[in-house]
Image: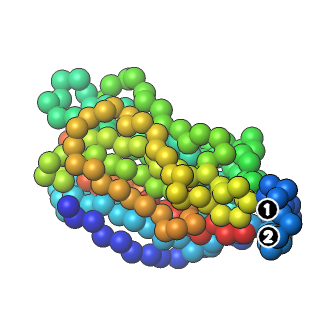
Amino acid sequence: MRIARSAFALFALSAAGCAVDAAAPDLAVDAPPLAESWTVSTTASIDLWSSGLNANLSDWRHIHCYEDHGEGYMLTGINVHQEDIADPDEFVARMTGECREFDLTDPALPRTGGFATSNIFQAPLFRTGVFQLEVTNNNYPIGLDLKVDGNDDYVKDVRIVYAPKNLAQTALNLAATSRTSWAFGYAGSKVSLSCPAQSVMTGLALRFDEVEGKIRTLKIHCRDLQP
């Protein structure tokens, strides 16, 4: 499996607001006061999977929730289509993404009405039926799982990884991590792309084979989320 990790800076704004103590009454007495604001880091890190194949590669196709829509937006949904029914291989042949806004002035980070969708890529041919993957309410996206073919050449399937806040509303509860279902249920080798602890997924980028329509490289963008 060929996986690489790197980090880079992406400019954006910081967020600030007022927090309230959401801890249970028996915990609030002895707990230290909560921080007065939430921030989403202006610096992004990435986790990347690559097949190592370069023939017919597209340029980078992406969805950037944070940069394109605002500091409170995270990547909470992915819609995908299967390969053309006549194609003998199984793979993700089209992908769109959904960005949702979270209220950074509230320690529980509830979702607001803010919502934006973007087409990420599509193969020359694909089936019309769409499979929707969505992070459930009161949870925050922290990564992707991929299924790749036996040679690590292309992406066959995908699902989103997410986590809730802890009871005190002071951090992500990574011990309670969950996942959506796989989009298609295709068999393959699993690859996990994970945000660092206490970071959320704010976008992704990929390159695909413009002839065969298969994803050859995919990376997620993550930003620190801290009270």
Label 1 sits on a secondary structure element that is helix
Residue 147 in view: yes
Residue 223, image x and y in percent?
A: 57, 67
In this image, 11 relative to 146: left or right? right
Foreground of the two, 85 or 141: 141
* Residue nearest the observer in this picture, 12 or 102: 102
Residue 69, percent from left and from top: 66, 54
Vertical side of 137 occupied by 191: above or below: below
Instruction: Give the quadrant of the C terminus.
Output: bottom right
From the viewer's perspective, tell me whether residue 123 is left or right of residue 139: left
Amino acid on which the number 2 mark rests in the picture: Ala
15 or 162: nearer the viewer: 162
User: Which residue shows up at 52% across the image and 68% down it?
Assistant: 197
Q: Are marks 2 and 1 in contact (CB under 8 Å)?
A: yes
Q: Which residue is mark 1?
A: 27
What secondary structure is found at the residue carrying circle 2? loop
Q: Position of residue 97 (x, y in %)?
A: 51, 44
Q: CA distance from mark 2 to mark 1?
A: 6 Å
Estimate the x, y position of residue 199 in percent, counting from the top left.
56, 65
Residue drawn at (35%, 56%) of the image: 192
On the rendered structure, is 161 left or right of 30? left
Quadrant of res 183:
top left
Residue 196 vertical position relative to residue 92 in the rendered view, above or below:
below
Residue type at mark 1: give it: Leu
| Mark carried by residue 47 | none
Q: Which mark is residue 31?
A: 2
